[in-house]
Image: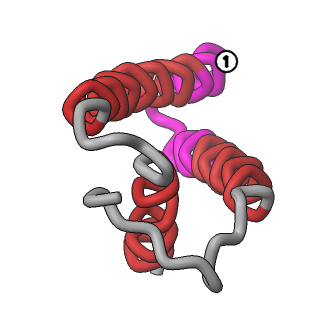
């Protein structure tokens, strides 16, 4: 479900990045959005790794229930970060009634 939701959100977000650009600006914005995706993904993965490691810091090696709780806690944070990102999606400009094309 999460993958389908992110797929549904990603297309409008990416389309909004190109709205109102001239033909010459599109390659620069394309490169910039890809770089920001890579940096954001690496940053997000490292934040989640730090959260998980901090949960593991106080565990005994053989305590499976505690490890399960650590992963559940980290997954809860991924859900919170996803919900926060949806706030930004809601405030994106609504351009449904207008016809924008890159050939303008």
Residue 65 visible somewhere in the drawing: no
Along the viewing direction, whichever of 60 and 45 lies nearer the viewer: 45
Q: Residue at x 60, y 14 (%)?
A: 57
Q: Residue at x 27, y 25 (%)?
A: 28
Quadrant for the C terminus in the image: bottom left
What is the x, y in percent for residue 34?
A: 28, 32
Q: Give left or right: position of 35 versus 54.
A: left
Whether 61 is drawn above or below 9: the answer is: above
Count numbered badges in the picture: 1
Residue 26 visible somewhere in the drawing: yes
Q: Residue 14 sits in which quadrant?
A: bottom left
Q: Residue at x 39, y 25 (%)?
A: 36
Q: Decide: few, some or many residues near mark 1? Use Cα within 10 Å; few <14, some 14-19, many ≥20.
A: few
Q: Which residue is mark 1?
A: 58
Q: Residue 7 sits in which quadrant?
A: bottom left
Q: Give left or right: position of 60 versus 33.
A: right
Secondary structure, magenta segment, majority class: helix
Whether 65 is drawn above or below 57: the answer is: below
Q: Which element carries disc 1, helix, strand or loop?
A: loop
What is the x, y in percent for residue 26?
A: 27, 38
Q: Give left or right: position of 26 versus 78.
A: left
Whether 86 is drawn above or below 1: the answer is: above
What is the x, y in percent for residue 77?
A: 68, 44
Is 63 in the magenta? yes
Is 68 in the magenta? yes
Along the viewing direction, whichever of 38 and 12 lies nearer the viewer: 12
What is the x, y in percent for residue 41?
A: 39, 31
Q: Residue at x 25, y 42 (%)?
A: 23
Along the viewing direction, whichever of 22 and 11 lies nearer the viewer: 22
Q: Which residues are magenta?
A: 51-71
The structure's colour scheme is: secondary structure
Whether 60 is drawn above or below 11: the answer is: above
């Amino acid at each position: 479900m999460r993958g389908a939701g992110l797929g549904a959100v990603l297309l409008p977000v990416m389309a909004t990045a190109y709205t109102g650009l001239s033909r010459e600006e599109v390659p620069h914005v394309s490169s910039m959005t890809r770089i920001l995706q890579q940096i954001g993904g690496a940053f997000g993965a490292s934040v989640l790794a730090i959260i998980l490691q901090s949960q593991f810091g106080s565990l005994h090696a053989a305590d499976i229930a505690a490890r399960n709780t650590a992963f559940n806690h980290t997954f809860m944070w991924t859900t919170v970060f996803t919900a926060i990102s949806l706030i930004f999606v809601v405030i994106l400009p609504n351009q449904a009634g207008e016809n924008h094309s890159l050939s303008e």
